[in-house]
């Protein structure tokens, strides 16, 4: 599961530091106003985005109606691990979206300012405290260890338009809006595993979970096994490797062969997966399928995997997000591609970027509906009224007011030497397959924190 893998990658990085690696965090400034992005070529650019009309536009809104709101600007915090990971995806999305919105006139004339809060991986609470002190909301951000900052955010009543929640304590937490339906209550991948097992029936009783051993991936492996078994398969093999990585993957490839594994889910970095697949190729062992997890859904994985893609069948599950490679057929996704080219030249459009744009759009549409009297209460209440949110066409419909709902739609990608492309999973609603029976997961996972856990209620939101 992509969300667990991000947290795993964070823990793996911590382990590397403890072992003496020298990946130092960035010392760059914590705030990054959108004004630093290149100016749009047309200041009066239309504020439409896909199927959404007039999202951003000029106006005469005035007054300091809430923290982070003035007559001229709205300050939105962006949580990111960029200082440690060196991954600028969420900064890129924030710069591109806010620059586009501001060129169209802003939110009723108020300009958006993206306030970057760098967790530097482990400093989630200080980053959240900084956001609590200055921002109107959080928008378009995410952090691998986000569960550490939920209590701080709820205590200061900070709405979170989250690009993607990660830890169980945060997924579906109070005052949270997310463009994808994900929680630890239901399996987000029931339909995905069902398709893998039906497409390769011989693999059903020969499934493994291969993962870098950590408390995070132990949970992910358990969730995967529950889903496979509920879909009629079995998971006889549980293959763990050190979270800091492996220098020789041949013993793991041999173990997969010896155990007769025909399909496995991989929880680790895409680089480690490529190394394992190369070892499998070297010993001449071919599987029916490999679940790469969605972290591998990038052009970089295609380039790195190379010839392994002709030997192994690699698939990635998407949580109802429109495929990047089909952008030309989707005005909203095509607009994201265009804006990244304009405001972050040379940077890729990834799944995270698409989800970040949808999160930003959900905030902007909600804020616009409030008019001049912009408050946290108004923007949150407007957001949860969106029962079929698609981000203008970026995702399948999502009920923003029910974060703990069962997922309704999914899509599946397969890796080929020419790039990622939709798998033959029999979509029944455009590029998505919708209507699969929900699969409730077993108990034992931490519950998402709510306002009541910190002594607050929605009545405290002003």
Image (cartoon, rainbow, N blue to C red):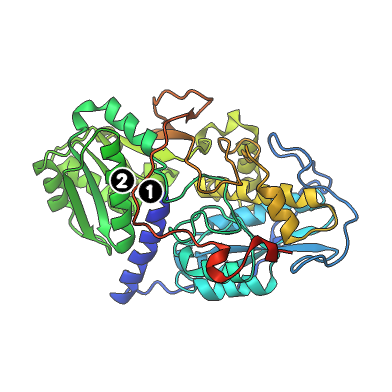
Q: Secondary structure at mark 1?
A: loop
Pointer 2: residues within 10 angstroms few (<14), some, or many (20+)? many
In the image shown, does 109 or 302 lie closer to the viewer?
Answer: 109
Marks 2 and 1 in Cβ contact (< 8 Å): yes
Whether residue 86 is situated above or below residue 178 in the rendered picture? below
The answer, for residue 26, to whether it is visible in the render is: no
* Residue 254 left/right relative to 18: left
* Residue 94 left/right relative to 193: right
Nearer to us of marks 2 and 1 is 2
Whether residue 386 is situated above or below residue 221 in the rendered picture? above
Reading the image, the residue beneath label 1 is 1
The answer, for residue 67, to whether it is visible in the render is: yes
Q: Residue at x 65, y 48 (%)?
A: 384
Residue 323, percent from left and from top: 50, 35
Checking the image for residue 374, the label placed there is none
Residue lying furthest right in this view?
60
Residue 209, percent from left and from top: 24, 47
Residue 212 lies in quadrant: bottom left
Distance between the Cα atoms at labels 2 and 1?
8 Å
Reading the image, the residue beneath label 2 is 224
| First of labels 2, 1 by sequence position | 1
Whether residue 346 is situated above or below residue 192 in the rendered picture? below
In the image shown, does 208 or 45 lie closer to the viewer?
Answer: 208
Q: Secondary structure at mark 2?
A: helix
Residue 37, percent from left and from top: 69, 58
The mark tally for this picture is 2
């Amino acid at each position: 599961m992509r969300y667990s893998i991000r947290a795993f990658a964070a823990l793996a990085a911590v382990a590397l530091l403890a072992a003496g690696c020298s990946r130092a965090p960035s010392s760059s400034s914590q705030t990054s106003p959108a004004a630093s992005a290149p100016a749009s070529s047309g200041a009066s650019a239309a504020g439409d985005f896909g199927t959404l009309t007039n999202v951003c536009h000029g106006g005469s809104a005035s007054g300091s109606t809430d923290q982070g709101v003035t007559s001229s600007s709205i300050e939105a915090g962006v949580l990111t691990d960029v200082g440690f990971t060196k991954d600028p995806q969420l900064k890129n999305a924030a710069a591109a979206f806010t620059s586009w919105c501001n060129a169209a006139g802003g939110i009723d004339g108020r300009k958006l300012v993206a306030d970057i809060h760098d967790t530097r991986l482990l400093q989630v609470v200080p980053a959240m405290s900084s956001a609590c002190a200055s921002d109107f909301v959080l928008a378009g951000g995410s952090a691998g260890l986000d569960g550490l900052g939920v209590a701080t955010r709820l205590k200061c009543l900070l709405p979170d338009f989250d690009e993607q929640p990660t830890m169980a304590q945060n997924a579906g937490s109070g005052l949270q809006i997310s463009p994808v339906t994900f929680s630890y209550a239901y399996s987000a991948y029931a339909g995905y595993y069902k398709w893998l097992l039906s497409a390769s029936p011989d693999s059903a009783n020969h499934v493994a979970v291969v993962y870098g051993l950590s408390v995070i991936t132990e949970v992910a492996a358990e969730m995967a096994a529950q889903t496979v078994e509920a879909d009629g398969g079995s998971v006889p093999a549980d293959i763990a490797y050190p979270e800091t990585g492996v220098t020789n993957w041949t013993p793991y490839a041999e173990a997969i062969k010896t155990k007769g594994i025909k399909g496995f889910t991989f929880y680790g970095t895409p680089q480690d997966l490529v190394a394992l697949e190369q070892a499998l190729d070297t010993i001449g062992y071919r599987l029916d399928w490999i679940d790469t997890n969605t972290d591998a859904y990038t052009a970089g994985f295609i380039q790195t995997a190379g010839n392994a893609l002709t030997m192994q069948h690699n698939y990635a599950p998407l949580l109802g997000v429109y495929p990047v490679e089909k952008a030309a057929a989707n005005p909203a996704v095509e607009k994201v591609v265009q804006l990244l080219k304009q405001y972050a030249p040379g940077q890729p459009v990834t799944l995270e970027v698409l989800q970040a744009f949808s999160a930003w759009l959900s905030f902007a549409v909600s804020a616009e509906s409030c008019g001049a009297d912009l408050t946290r209460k108004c923007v949150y209440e407007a957001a949860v009224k969106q029962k079929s949110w698609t981000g203008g066409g970026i995702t399948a419909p999502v009920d923003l007011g029910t974060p703990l709902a069962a997922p309704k739609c999914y899509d599946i990608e397969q890796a080929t030497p020419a790039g990622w492309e939709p798998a033959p999973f029999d979509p029944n609603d455009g590029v998505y397959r919708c209507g699969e029976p929900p699969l409730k997961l077993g108990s034992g996972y931490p519950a998402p924190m709510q306002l009541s856990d910190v002594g607050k209620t929605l009545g405290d939101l002003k």
